Image (cartoon, grey):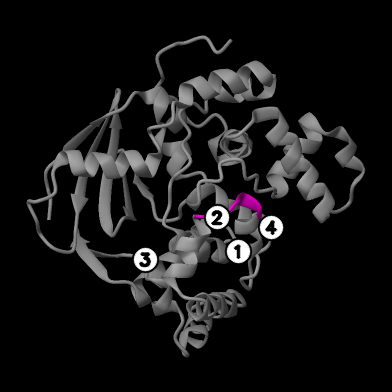
Amino acid sequence: MSKRWFKLFCRNQDLQLIGTLNGGQSFRWKKDEKQNQWTGVFSNKVWILQQEQDVILYKVYESKETDCNSEEYYNDLLRQYFQLDIDLESYYLQWSGKDPNFKEAAKQFYGIRILKQDITENIFSFICSQNNHISRISSMVEKLAQFYGEKICNIDDKSYYAFPNVNALAGNDIELKLRENGFGYRAKYISNSAAYIVSQGGQKWLDNLKLMTYDECKKNLMSLMGIGAKVADCICLMSLGHLDAIPVDTHIYQIAARLYMPELKKQKTVTDKIYNEIGEYFRNLYGPLAGWAHTILFCADLKKFQNTENVKKLKPRKRKLN
């Protein structure tokens, strides 16, 4: 168990923690406002992150104490998780040149990263997300980890758990227990989807998703109970490398109607046709990483981020975007 602070050198304009960790991608990160630290779980480890000027300080806690894993090893995990190999600043320049609305959003929402998340956790987290708000989704995801995942460690009298594998969510009593613990109709979706994945090969079925085209991947995900087009696109974007996937929810529909596609204002519902038209519009506008660009617009539209002091604390070095 590591209690040492490690360092990952990373410019502020390349990674902004608040917009990335608190923007509705992952539901396992909590911020300690007093310490200005983020605590979360991924890769079966507990991470404590603190952003300073052009550096991420962090600690890592694991289920078994080991001195074998080096700072370089942990840095690589963080780089993969935040996809730091992608030159985000150059994409911001491209997107800002194509879209004045993006250019305005980029002034505050620089360094927003798409997290590279575990496919199992992402599927079941977003099943929980339907008709729900972030604090309740986070509570449900933590319950799944506590009930069916392996314990990692205790920190300050709080227990942390890894997210369970799909087999652990496919038991006969899963739906009943989850209903008793406030999951509502989502309990059936979780139980049924886990059982279906296991019946199709379990982890092999999940791994095969990574080999599919975007359309094939989305179609297979939508065969799971409780997963529609929007949730499937979230999973494609955040776990399967399809960075052109555009999840269209109420926020994105309103942004599209207000700023890009005024003809949508006449529509009363988001049909499949309209959903696909919005996705194609943004793909044509932003290119192969359209889903990433749309996430910045999504963050800029969230009221909790508007004019927040947290976003303004760490300013990037000034650089013109045109």
Label 2 element class? helix
Front label number (4 vs 1): 1
N-terminal-most mark, 2 or 3: 3
Q: Is residue 212 magenta?
A: yes
Q: Marks 3 and 2: in contact by CB < 8 Å? A: no
Rendered location of residue 190, percent (x, y): 54, 75
Image-based side of 266 in relation to 48, left or right: right
* Residue drawn at x 12%, y 56% as measured from the top left: 1
Q: Which residues are magenta?
A: 211-215
Tell me whether the residue at label 1 lies in contact with that at label 2, contact meaning CB atoms closer than 8 angstroms: yes
Earlier in the chain: of badge 3 and badge 4, it is 3
Q: Which labelled disc corresponds to residue 229?
A: 4
Q: Is residue 153 left or right of residue 219?
A: left
Q: Would you say residue 52 is visible in this rendering?
A: yes
Q: Amino acid at mark 4?
A: Ala
Task: Tell me the CA gap for discs 1 and 2.
Answer: 8 Å
User: Are the two marked residues, 1 and 3, in contact with CB atoms closer than 8 angstroms?
Assistant: no
Q: Quadrant of residue 81?
A: top left
Residue beneath label 3, please? 163
Q: Nearer the viewer, mark 1 or mark 3?
A: 1
Residue labelled with disc 2: 235
Amino acid residing under circle 2 = Ile
Asked where in the image residue 228 lies, by quadrant, the reply is bottom right
